[in-house]
Image (spheres, helix red, strand yellow):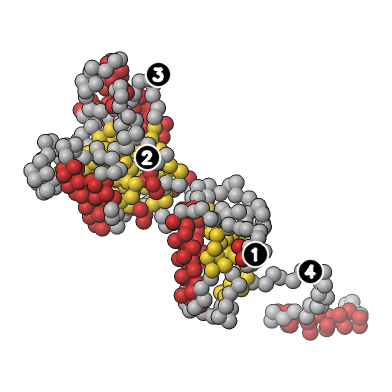
Amino acid sequence: MKRISLRLLALLFTAILVLPLVGCGQTPPAEEEAPDETAEPAPEPLTVVADGTSVYQIVRPELCTQQLTDAAVALNRQIKAMTGVGLTITTDWENERISSTLAGEYEIVLGETTRNGKYFTYDTTDIGTYDYDITVIENRVLILGGSETATASAVEYFIEHCLPAAPTDTIEIDPALHVEYRVPESDKMTVMSLNLLATDTEYAANANNNQHLIQVRQPRIREIILTHMPDSIGLQECSAPWRQYFDGMDASWSYDRTGASKNQKISILYNTDKLELVKSGSIWLTEDPEHLKVSVEWKGESERLAHYAVFKIKETGEHYVHVNTHVGTESTLLQTGQATVVRTYCEQLAEETGYPVVCTGDFNFTLESPSYTALTETLLRDTKFEAAESSTGTGSFNKMGKAGYPKAYPIDQVLVSADDWNVYTYAVDYTTFDGCYYSDHYAVVATMTMKE
């Protein structure tokens, strides 16, 4: 038998003493590292309010919309509600001779002001129309969107997520604060309103009469639709030849049609790749919308309807209601009555479903009409005025180029329940085909996203 040396026994004995300590999760104390005297200290939080006072002010652009002004006021109200301290709201206007107008070091800057590029530099090239950033630059908080609507949304986010929700003596902002919001492409929606012109004969007296035939115009309409690829399209004057055309498309055509049960000349096309039809229905635009076809009290001469469809967005599971209509022409009395019916219908659908609403239509009245006021005085807002980018006031009725007829006759609208949508763009498609028209109305197109 071999002998174990005393040295080896000593080593084994030492190991036996150490092993239980390690097995219990204990480790020998680590050697303390010497502090790095060259490291910069962590930046201090931005103290917006403390001890009943503040050195901060809120800065907005000198020339901005009421929406952004209201956002600045809402931000200030929340700060005051939580701390009892209100900030000064000022603009980016400066005068070198008046020291009180010059920029301060401590500011909450809203939107695209002259501060950017003069007192700090922040790259905005990748901020889209409804995107926004919230960030800290030295002692400033910058809340900046790609449009004033987006900046207002960013202010809402800042109030909800960056300010205290309960009364406090102090508001401090993390100096590392940086929020980037980019609208996903899948969230963007396009809605179109398009009067197709139901007959071949209405403009028979015009030159190039054959260019006004439905069968000649059908490929043009298809091209207009495929150019914009709307999610849903409100169609007016969708007569039998048009219904046969749309319903007979081949499999490459990604649209299906839902028509008003009471009269399918009012129809909605929807992109089946993106939307699922949940349900639909219709009413007449009369004093008794469920039972009376033609107005008596308002002296109508023909059936006028509103048709709705509830759609589910396949990718997100969200829903919205699309209402489509065609108002009569007989008198302002009739138009105001029918506009009121449409507005009430949209309000009822919004309340019953809880979903956002879009409303398309040929309304046959201009923006100065009392009928337009009746239509837009509560729930509905016109996308031409809600849009961040808009060709506002442009006309949509071209009368097939009839001599002497003005273009600027905006009677076709895309409306939205304003509290539910961010509207990107509004435009009228003035495309012609070798000088010939696709309808006696131009398509009106709006792009938007649902608000969170």
Residue at the location (8% across, 45% down)?
297
Residue assigned mark 4:
39
The image quadrant that residue 350 belongs to is: bottom left
Spatial distance from mark 2 to mark 3, Cα to Cα? 26 Å
Camera-nearest label, 2 or 3: 2
Q: Is residue 41 above or below residue 382?
A: below
Find residue 165 and report its horizontal and vertical position in percent. Answer: 47, 73
Mark 2: amino acid: Gly
Q: On residue 99, which mark appears?
A: 1
Q: Are marks 2 and 3 in contact (CB under 8 Å)?
A: no
Left or right: 90 as drawn, with respect to 5 = left
Mark 4: amino acid: Ala
The image quadrant that residue 273 belongs to is: top left
**SS state under label 3:** loop
Mark 1: amino acid: Ser
Spatial distance from mark 4 to mark 3, Cα to Cα? 71 Å
Residue assigned mark 3:
434
Find residue 440 and report its horizontal and vertical position in percent. Answer: 29, 27
**SS state under label 1:** helix
Q: Name the image quarter holding the N terminus.
A: bottom right
Residue at the location (30% across, 15% down)?
208
What crowding class fits label 4: few (fewer than 14 Cα within 10 Å), some (14-19), or many (20 or more)?
few
Find residue 30 and report its horizontal and vertical position in percent. Answer: 79, 77
Find residue 391 and report its horizontal and vertical position in percent. Answer: 42, 39
Residue 181 visible in the current orientation: no
Residue assigned mark 2:
393
